[in-house]
Image (tube, rainbow, N blue to C red):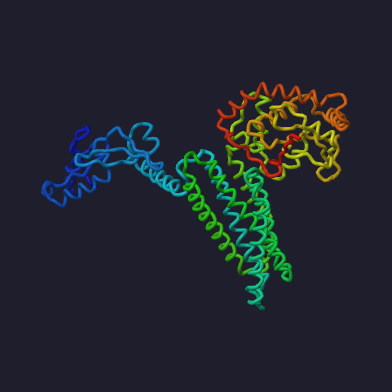
Amino acid sequence: MVATSIIAAALPGSVVSIGSSQCSYDFSRHVQVGHRRRLQPPRAFVDDKRWREWLQWRNSWHPEKNGKKLPVVIFEGGRRWQYVFDGERMRTVELDEEALQKGEGRDESVNGRVAESFIRAKQTLLRIFVPDQVRPHYLVYLKWKLAHRFLSSILHFQCTQAMLWAIGVGAKRRLPAAAVLNWVMKDGLGRLGKLIYTASLGRTFDSNLKKVRFSTSALFSLSVGLEIMTPLFPRYFLLLATLAHVAKSIAYAAYLSTSSAIHRSFALGNNLADISAKGQAQTVIADNLGLAVAICLSQIIHHHPTIERIFPFATYPFLALAELYAIYNQLQAVHLQTLNKERLEIVISTWVKDRRIPSFEEVSTVENAALLNFFNGRKQQLLFRIGAVSSRFLTPERLMSILDLHDTQRYALCLEPLSPSPFLVHPSFSHSGLLLWLHEKASTEDIIMGVLQVCHIRAKKITSKASLQQLGKQYEKGDIDGAWRNLLLESRQKAEADFETLLDAIKDEGWITKDILLGPKEKCSFSILKS
């Protein structure tokens, strides 16, 4: 047994020595400070130059222990630093969020250092992959974007592997010349399809950004399915691969065209280039992770040829649906501040009903990002669109009645016949909708006024099926009883009374009212010749 005796005062800063019958060691150079002991150098080395240099170097790692903190905090790139003067020069010490709120430095305990390491790693990743000045919902968008790119990378690996099987690469009988020709031809035809799409429909990207993004993403998933099907029909490889590549090119063109507008919606300052650069870094990480997982799965099932051939067909439906779900949630996290026909309708309808302007987040949840919601819109009893009147249902008398405007009115509002079902092609005034036809000199205020009048008409008790049918039939006969004209006058008066209040409320909420984003058909306007 080792007899141990401790001779020390139970006070901070006391000298502790331990003696034993078998060993003797002097711990007098351990001085207790608070609850920690600090190593004191032997007296023989106090004047040693190398010891002083080592001590100075060690203290430089933690200047906050040996220096005086100054009440100045620096904010740089999401990190926070505090000035410390150690007696010789000024240094900076990094602070975490909790320490900043408490006015303290870092926690020197083991748990504190571990937590600090995680915080530093998190801050480093955020600094590399997340822009500085972005809105809070950017992280939600980023989460679903990474999931989408990860799944898309796996699908891309599988479809590429399937096409290589289809042209004979990896098979016993290979056709290198035909394979190269088919591959080059499908790429060239795909670029041609991309050119035709962007030239003809590029003007709709701004006004229907979310719908374009989601619909082209669904088209991309279908193109992957076509490419995976090529091994089953090797004789039609060129046809299937070309169709798939055209669809992919269209989706990629829409992705590039809409990305800048999406990135701009997250920017709090003029840092669009930073957001775009960080977005590319995020894409590379997610794509490489997905590719690594796909390669690992391929290596695992490589020794089972039957499973290897069936695996892409079995996993495609689940991966495609998961990818579309991620894209849908990704777009729901995009809160656009610009106004198009759909968002303006949501904003004004909410104001007419509740006398308040919805936030960006509320409008995003209501806005129809998915094409699946297109048919649900027909369940409304009074649909509304902006555009020109179809000449198919016009007569000279009806046209002049529509354009019988006030001097200050720069839009026409009328009923138009609709099909009772999206699959029927025989419109009827028994299933009417509202049409807002803009004058060529119509301004943003005129568009808002027209939509406000539409919402006041909707607020009237005419949305039942019987009331709409009766109103449509009377309108078709020339509005004999004047019900439609009275409805127009009443709604116009209400819109004029509410317009200034509504416009101020929209601007106060932060919506951009400088321009209303309309599609090519919605921009179709009219003008009345003086003669």
- Residue 211: image location, x then y, percent: 66, 45
Observer-nearest residue: 313 or 346? 346
- Residue lying farthest bottom? 173
- Residue 444: image location, x then y, percent: 63, 34
Observer-nearest residue: 25 or 36? 36
Quadrant position of the C terminus in the picture: top right
Residue 321 can be seen, yes or no: no
- Residue 50: image location, x then y, percent: 16, 52
Q: Is residue 505 left or right of residue 454?
A: left
What residue is drawn where x is 51% and y is 51%? 282
- Residue 308: image location, x then y, percent: 65, 66
Residue 346 occupies quadrant? top right
Count of numbered badges drawn on the protein: 0
What residue is drawn where x is 59% and y is 32%? 359
Residue 234 can be seen, yes or no: yes
Residue 115 occupies quadrant? top left
Q: Is residue 432 left or right of residue 223?
A: right
Observer-nearest residue: 14 or 276? 276
Observer-nearest residue: 356 or 172? 356
Above/below status of 151 relative to 7? below
